[in-house]
Amino acid sequence: MVSEAPPVSTERVFEIATELLAVDTQNPPGETRALAEWVDSFFTDLGLETETVATDPVKPNVLTTIPGETERTLLYNGHIDTVPFDADEWTYDPLGEREADRLYGRGATDMKGPLAAMLHAAEAFVETDTTPPVTLAFAVVSDEETGGDAGVGTLLRREAVDADACVIGETTCSRGQHSVTVADRGSIWLTLEAEGVSAHGSRPMLGENAIDRLWAAVTTLRTRLSDRELSLPADFERILAESVTYYEPTMGEQQARRLFARPTVNLGTIEGGESINTVPGTARAQLDIRLTAGIETSEILADIRDCLAAYPAVSIADVSWSVGTYEPPDSPLVEAVTTVASEAIGDRIFRRSATGGGDTKKFRKADIPTVEFAFGTDTVHAVDEYTTAAALAANAAVYSRLPVVWADAV
């Protein structure tokens, strides 16, 4: 088994990232074929066999594998689509522009920069003829920013990936703090409808205002859920503590703790009525409820239904949900990523929960232990998004070193 990772080059990661940024992959519309073909050629030029898997022909996914000394498999996952941009708002070229140690462009930090580091890690193993201690798999997907159905969702439905652990190259640092994301939150998206009795606005006492009825139910529901203490699993306590510390500079200690200790409820939309001088006969609202990993969504749904029983004119028109997931903070994967990342920058790496959820959750529910990790900047989805030479180099060092450390941890 090898004891050292192959060397990596900061300038080479810059070159690969620049190539990735040069191809417009805004999603929507999600036309990513050209860049997927570039990634496929990158791998085949290294002598690797590739596979293309797609349910949407304009959003293909590219897979490859580097055989290791064992069949245990570490999967690197990255997406090539980006959120849209308005070039007129940018100071720099959104399709890539370098200035000193910064590389600007849409996707520079989310996540073409980290993906470039993953590709360079693969290149480093192949070109130095270094056999990794474990098999390395790469899944470069074309659809993440709009839900991932044509990306990771497709790969899992097709059973196209099989791994013992996975690292997704999403940037996981903010305000000078670095982290590995080991958990995500569950969600309940709730649509409520209220029935009333229409009347003229000059005689409102002859009607029943559906918006008033809906508002009363929503207010009660928000208060009840926001005051509900969550009973978290014992092994989540460390994640909770590190998450609170990580988010404290952004929102304060009290709010950071509430974020995970209780459900959060956001009233996203509310609508009803036809005109200012009419008592509305119907009304509709949509709520986004988020729950810390380890909480049974069914218990919260039961609480919601019990709460709404006091409001017979208000009903649930639609509901969808997901369950939060997490990796134990002392698992081999988390320990390996944390160790390698800390060595790369000489600083603390928090083991924290994300505030939302993404492709990580899909992999975990397919029984593939998964974390998110990458160095980057606070410019995700922002105008003049950029990454730095230091972040690119550190990511490449982590991704090339990780197989060695993870192999020793399992």
Image (cartoon, rainbow, N blue to C red):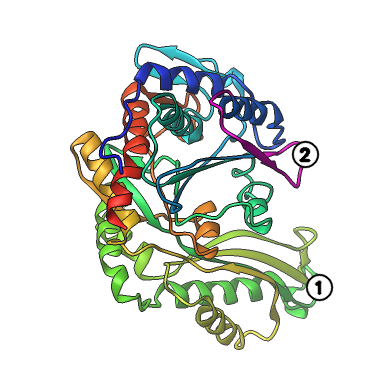
Task: Work out whether residue 210 or residue 364 is closer to the camera in this orientation and state it.
Answer: 364
Task: Work out whether residue 290 or residue 38 is closer to the camera in this orientation and state it.
Answer: 38
Q: Quadrant of residue 329?
A: bottom left
Q: Quadrant of the C terminus?
A: bottom left
Q: Which residue is mark 1?
A: 199
- Residue count near mark 2 (Cα–Cα under 10 Å), binned few <14, some 14–19, many ≥20: few
How far apart are labels 2 and 1 at the CA level?
A: 53 Å
Residue 277 location, x and y as percent?
77, 61
Q: Residue at x 26, y 57 (%)?
A: 242
Q: Quadrant of residue 302?
A: bottom right
Magenta extent: 45-61
Q: Residue at x 34, y 49 (%)?
A: 180
Asked if one can make out residue 198 in the rendered structure from this viewpoint, the answer is: yes
Does the stretch in magenta take in 53? yes
Residue 319 location, x and y as percent?
66, 71
Is residue 101 placed above or below 34 in the rendered structure?
above
Q: Which residue is mark 2?
A: 57
With 125 as the anchor, is 298 left or right in this view? right
Is residue 300 placed above or below 408 in the rendered structure?
below
With 223 as the anchor, is 306 left or right in this view? right
Give SS at disc 2.
Answer: loop
